[in-house]
Amino acid sequence: MRIAVLNDAGGGEPRVAATPETVKKFTGLGATVAVETGAGTQAGLSDADFEEAGAEIAPTRAAAVSGAEAILAVRAPEAATLAGAARGAIVCGILNPMQARDTLDAYANAGLTAMAMEFMPRITRAQSMDVLSSQSNLAGYKSVLDAAAEYGRAFPMMMTAAGTISAAKVFVMGVGVAGLQAIATARRLGAQVSATDVRAATREQIESLGAKAIFVEDVAGIEGEGTGGYASEMSEEYKAAQAKLVSDHIAKQDIVITTALIPGRPAPRLVSDAQLQSMKPGSVLVDLAVEQGGNVEGAQAGEIVRVHGVRIIGHRNVPGRLAEVASQLYARNLWNFLSAFWDKEANTLVWPDDDEIVQGVRVTHGGTVGNARLDA
């Protein structure tokens, strides 16, 4: 079996879908791995590193995908660039299926089977395959470092001969994987941390990390828990109560990190222009949802802007800002996924139609586009 690893750098993606570690594992199964030249350069991995691990270095994408039965990428490659792959070849990557129907149609027309890794079910068996968790964990960590770089003061309380410096106040909005890591990182740096989420079940998680939980009270029957552990949209009553709570709290904060996303929908607006005006000049906001429309009014994707004296950080592809370690984790996610469906006797991949993971991630198959989450 031939596995192709693509170079995503041309699209501005520094991560790579395989590492020498996972190449060795694939070749150990009996697969042939072809890595498009330069695929790992921006993640600190040279062609020589891959070659030493047993990969073939392909001079072009066409050479890499020629005859490939599995194609590994970070971002969704254009179907036209995959001509020459085996009929029915699988394409694994973060494919953005809800916003890229044209791409899925092209895969289906080309006879490719597309596996959208961000659709991985959040079940115990799939935890090691969950790319959203692995990459969001890094995004949460990096968001705090990015905030610290822009913030004009130190994070911890410091007692010096010249006087005491107060600890920075950090408020995390959205307590998924990224939010929890942001809380933990800010706490390690010595900040005074608080956090909120629409899911009532996260209160215990927040407090277990030593942060203060900020929650709307006395709004009955609203738990905010959607399918698969993701947040769901809130009632107007809840939104109004949350807006008032946040407005009162945010004015006292030095740093705010927003992480809220709803799968398949624009990111919810959490911080308004009026709330920005209430913050102290020199405060910093990091909007991790900026590529999906943003949680913060005035945030600009790919830019750091100043609004009412407040810096709003809107970096794109935050996990890619830690490309080497992000690639390591992503590559392991893919290895865990593919190896779970490897038939050792046939030396190939087998995809049972009734498997919960296959049903969750497969978005094109047999010339058609189809997935429960796309059809919902």
Image (cartoon, rainbow, N blue to C red):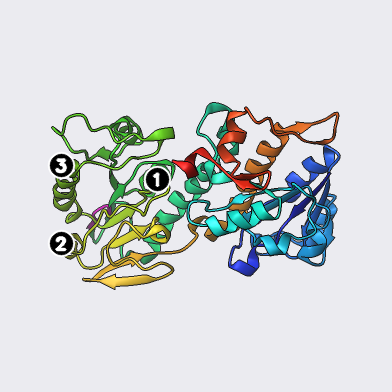
Mark on residue 237?
A: 3
The mark closer to the camera, 3 or 2, is 3
Q: Find out whether residue 350 is within the magenta segment.
A: no
Asked if the residues shown at circle 1 and circle 2 are in contact, with their CB atoms under 8 angstroms apart, the answer is: no
Question: Disc 3 or 2, which lies upstream in sequence?
Answer: 3
Camera-side residue: 201 or 63?
Answer: 63
Q: Is residue 116 visible?
A: no
User: Is residue 301 among the parts visible in the rendering?
Assistant: yes
State the separation of the CA atoms marked 3 and 2. Answer: 23 Å
Q: Which mark is residue 188?
A: 1
Residue under the image location 47 percent in, 42 percent down: 375
| Amino acid at dot 3 | Glu
Q: How many marks?
A: 3
Q: Is residue 165 magenta?
A: yes
Residue under label 2: 278
Disc 1 or disc 2, which is closer to the eye? 2
In the image: residue 209, left or right of residue 101 = left
Residue 290's disc is none
Q: CA distance from mark 3 to mark 1?
A: 36 Å
**CB atoms at circles 3 and 2 under 8 Å apart?**
no
Nearer to the camera, 265 or 223: 265
